[in-house]
Amino acid sequence: MAKRGKPALTICSTAFQTLGRAQASALGKKDLPIAVMPHPFGLRKRDEVRVIAEKVVDDILQLVTRGGAKSGGAR
């Protein structure tokens, strides 16, 4: 998507952040922005998930609007 001028980023949990960064680097996208949410996710109550989702949405908006997702800024 970034090649087409569209913002691109990925979302992962804290447990997979290192793996996500390594994979992005292996694919030549070491500066790919990553929005991170806490792990574990599946054991949380609905209200907790809503708070996490709202924060991740805020993180995504910041990454996209500051140009990080387009220009390769990292998180």
Image (cartoon, grey):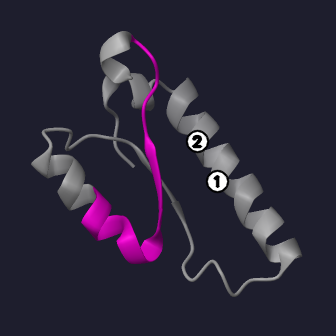
Residue 61 % position (x, y) = 63, 35
Residue 37 % position (x, y) = 56, 65
Amino acid type at image mark 2: Ile
For the N terminus, the image quarter is top left
- Relative side of 20 to 61, left or right: left
Amino acid type at image mark 1: Val
What residue lies at 57% left-to-right and 25% top-to-bottom?
Answer: 65
* 9 shown above or below 47: above
Residue 5 % position (x, y) = 40, 12
Relative depth, front residue between 41 and 65: 41
- Relative side of 59 to 22, left or right: right
Q: Let me know if residue 13 is in the magenta part.
A: yes
- Image quadrant of residue 74? top left
Q: Which residues are magenta?
A: 5-20
Mark 2 element type: helix
- Image quadrant of residue 50? bottom right
Point out the residue furthest to the bottom here: 43
What residue lies at 43% left-to-right and 39% top-to-bottom?
Answer: 9
Mark 1 element type: helix
CB atoms at circles 1 and 2 under 8 Å apart? Answer: yes
- Relative side of 22 to 41, left or right: left
What residue lies at 13% left-to-right and 39% top-to-bottom?
Answer: 28
- How many numbered marks does the figure carry? 2
Relative depth, front residue between 7 and 73: 7
* 4 shown above or below 60: above
- Relative side of 18 to 12, left or right: left
Q: Which residue is mark 2?
A: 60
Q: Which residue is mark 1?
A: 56
Q: Let me know if residue 63 is in the magenta part.
A: no
Residue 36 % position (x, y) = 50, 60
Relative depth, front residue between 7 and 75: 7
What residue lies at 15% left-to-right and 43% top-to-bottom?
Answer: 27
